[in-house]
Image (spheres, helix red, strand yellow):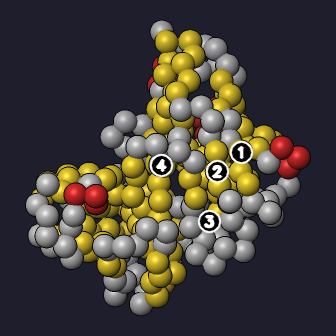
Amino acid sequence: AQSVTQPDIHITVSEGASLELRCNYSYGATPYLFWYVQSPGQGLQLLLKYFSGDTLVQGIKGFEAEFKRSQSSFNLRKPSVHWSDAAEYFCAVVPYMDSSYKLIFGSGTRLLVRP
Amino acid sequence: EAQVTQNPRYLITVTGKKLTVTCSQNMNHEYMSWYRQDPGLGLRQIYYSMNVEVTDKGDVPEGYKVSRKEKRNFPLILESPSPNQTSLYFCASSLTSGGSEQFFGPGTRLTVL
């Protein structure tokens, strides 16, 4: 079945440590790929997106993501986490040629940052 | 300021009492959409609209209605709310469909008793 999987429900890192959040998708053709962040009580903010081209994508707030076709993955990374990065992160896709253009979300990964 | 607004932000109601959650965007976006967010499930699309008077069902449309009479507004209507519609609702809009970035409203937390 077509799906977006974020295998980690919670991740805890120390401030200043590096971060990688995992995302895998199962679609026949490469979909449009997104990472959103949701801070407590807030809506969702787009961190970055991948449509085609360079497989390493830079986003806002120092985040980057790497698309790996062979692994059907789009993992989010940050070299040094700040306490303000504590939030819930969602990987999402828009399936290629899907006429509804809906975002299909993973179940999210909650990031906790230790001081 | 470019934004998507939703009202109300919080609502507690009782089973069967009709309600409307409004959504408005000031960015002249063609595409608008409603999602619900439930723990462990991420966000799921309820309805979407490609443009004025063009709406269609998403993945979880049962129990909801929408209308798109003006480009900027996309209200979500619950004719007879039930407890299983207790959720956090988000409206989103984008310039066009396809890979355009979707901008999200702040959310409406609905509780149906």
Image location (x, y in percent) of residue B37: 40, 52
Q: Is residue A71 left or right of residue A110?
A: right
* Callouts 3 and 4 on one subunit: yes
> Residue type at mark 4?
Leu
Count neighbours of disc 1 (C-alpha within 10 A) and say few if under 14, some if 14 to 19, many if 20 or more: many
Spatial separation of the CA atoms under disc 2 and disc 4:
11 Å
What chain does badge 4 belong to? Answer: B
> Residue type at mark 2?
Val
Say which residue label 2 marks. Answer: A4
Q: Is residue A77 left or right of residue B80?
A: right
Q: Nearer the viewer, mark 3 or mark 4?
A: 4
Is label 2 in a helix, a strand or a loop? strand
* Residue plotted at (46% across, 43% down): B40
Spatial separation of the CA atoms under disc 1 and disc 2:
6 Å
Image location (x, y in percent) of residue B90: 38, 58
* Residue plotted at (72% across, 38% down): A75
- In which quadrant of the rendered view does residue A63 lie? top right
Say which residue label 4 marks. Answer: B41
